[in-house]
Image: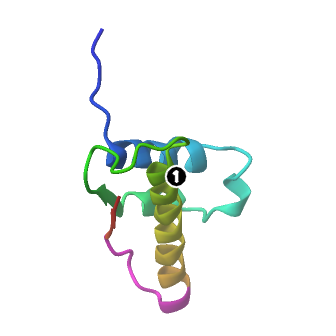
Amino acid sequence: MTIRAYSVPSESEILLRKGILENSVLSSNLPANADLLASFVKFSGNAKPNLPINWRFAESISCLKGLEAIWLNALLGAKHKQSPVNIEIDT
């Protein structure tokens, strides 16, 4: 069995993809091209949490910021006909 090292940026990306983008309850509230726009969102920062707290707080906030980035790129395309831009979230 391979044990994967814990990483706040990696877990944030997993939460964005699996917890939001692949969530059938939320799919009607997401841009149609959300999966494509998510490819422009990158998570960076320290792999270890700075504060040892419950509920994966840093990952949850970072994941929601990732969703915000998806919407920003969707709005850039819809309103200003601009291509998506890369957005980095420092966890």
Above-or-below relation of 64 to 51:
below
Q: Residue at x 37, y 57 (%)?
A: 39
Q: Quadrant of residue 10?
A: top left
Colour option used: rainbow
The residue at the far front in this view is 52
In this picture, which residue range is highlighted in magenta?
79-86
The residue at the far bottom in this view is 80
**Could you say whether the residue bearing mark 1 is in a helix, strand or loop?**
helix
The one of 69 and 8 positioned closer to us in this rendering: 8
The residue at the far top in this view is 1
Dot 1, crowdedness within 10 Å: few (<14), some or many (≥20)?
some
Residue 37 x/y as whole percent? 44, 63
Q: Which residue is mark 1?
A: 60
Above-or-below relation of 14 to 57:
above
Residue 2 x/y as whole percent? 27, 14
* Type of the residue with mark 1: Ser
Residue 57 x/y as whole percent? 50, 50
For the image shown, how many numbered marks are present on the structure? 1
Q: Quadrant of residue 91?
A: bottom left
Above-or-below relation of 11 to 63:
above
The one of 86 and 46 positioned closer to us in this rendering: 46
Q: Residue at x 48, y 91 (%)?
A: 80
The one of 82 and 91 positioned closer to us in this rendering: 91
Q: Does 81 appear in magenta?
A: yes
Above-or-below relation of 64 to 71:
above
Residue 3 x/y as whole percent? 29, 18
Magenta span: chief secondary structure: loop
Q: Quadrant of the N terminus?
A: top left
Q: Residue at x 39, y 74 (%)?
A: 84
The one of 62 and 51 positioned closer to us in this rendering: 51
Q: Is residue 51 left or right of residue 1?
A: right
Q: Does 62 appear in magenta?
A: no
